[in-house]
Amino acid sequence: MKKINFASDNYAGVHPEVMQAIWSANEGPSIAYGGDAITAAAIQQFKHHLGNHAETFFVFNGTGANVSALCAMTQSHEAVICAEKAHIQVDECGAPEKIAGCKLLLVPAIHGKITAEGIQSQLQRIGDQHHVQARVISISQSTEYGTVYTLDELRKLSAFAKAHNLYLHMDGARLANAAVSLQTDLKTIVEAAGVDVLSFGGTKNGMMMGEAVVFLNPLLAKSFLYIRKQNMQLASKMRFISAQFQALLSNNLWLNNARHANAMAQHMAQGLKKIKSIQITQPVDANAIFAIMPTALIEKLHTRYHFHIWDEHLSEVRLMTSFDTRIEEIDDFIRDAAQ
């Protein structure tokens, strides 16, 4: 029996409109390394959604996007402040430290979100040549716990960053889901946060491969062509990544995909809340549900469903929904969990 996926939105297939865009791009030769018309059109889509000042560069994957962005924002004696469970800390195999050469300074997070008060503790010994110098705040929107920073929370972080001469990086692997949750557009979120550099996700929202690094602070983009090449993130046949973004950002496909994923998460959460042996541990803002379940129940459910054990000691699991999650699959999971 084929297992049903609630492990990750990375498990999902490719949206048919995105697949068609790839197919349509496959017509004869085209200028390599981003000199093609499809890439130019996709870059214009980002300007439409994020502002004419946005400078966009396409890369292969999320780690490449985050690390390359941090390379453009830091020098080796500088540090990035992030949440203890930030993706750049726990899920990128030390790539920021190895490739960007910068130190990560960790701060505690509440439901995945960091605050100005928490960041303050890492602003120490400024100007001291013996101590690493904080330069960037990195946040995830939505967070690793599926929660979403409110616009007010983002504005407070932005004001704090500017007051302390810090850049702000946003890991937007699931920014589309955050926009749906906040019922706003992409530009409003980015402007509220005062984002300098954005890692914009495509793979988790219906694409086959590809992410984008978007500079809202154009000064930081000055050397990024070379940084991207050195970090092995320059695609020769870039049109096939660009075509996917052009499809995703046209006709509200990005929005509809994220809206469906979020709605499925809400449906699952409502069903799980009715089961006494299951405790939901985080607010369900986007497309992730975190829940504590009895170990025996986890073992039984794993025979039919893919999902991630987030914390073995707490018996806490993560359940993810995506653009292709079907409501019948969720109802089956809830029924099996209840039985």
Image: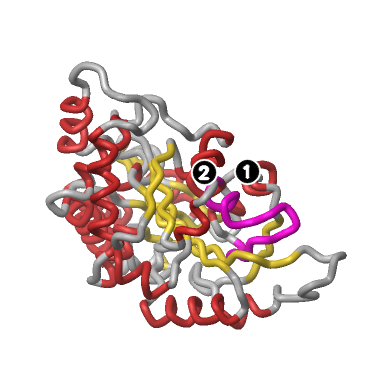
In depth, the one of 333 and 125 nearer the eye is: 125
Name the residue located 35 percent from the left edge and 60 percent from the top edge. 53
Specify few, some or many for label 1: CA neighbours under 10 Å numbering under 14, 14-19, or 20 or more. some
**Labelled pair 1, 2 in contact (Cβ < 8 Å):** yes
Residue 95 is marked as: 1
Q: Residue 17: say if magenta.
A: no
Q: Position of residue 196 (x, y in %)?
A: 47, 64
Task: Out of 83 and 18, give the one closest to the viewer.
Answer: 18
Mark 1 and mark 2: span between their CA atoms?
8 Å
State the extent of the magenta-drawn residues as a range. 68-84
Q: Residue at x 31, y 68 (%)?
A: 273
Do we see residue 170 in this rendering?
no
- The answer to whether residue 307 of the structure is visible from this angle is yes
**Viewed as shown, does residue 55 lie left or right of 260?**
right
Earlier residue among tags 1 and 2: 2
Q: Is residue 69 magenta?
A: yes
Residue 313 placement (x, y as % from top left): 60, 57
Q: Which mark is residue 289?
A: none
Q: Residue at x 49, y 52 (%)?
A: 221
How is colour applied across the structure in the image? secondary structure
Element marked by disc 1: helix
Residue at the extreme top of the image, as rendered: 28
| Amino acid type, mark 1 | Ala
The x and y percentages for residue 4 are: 29, 39
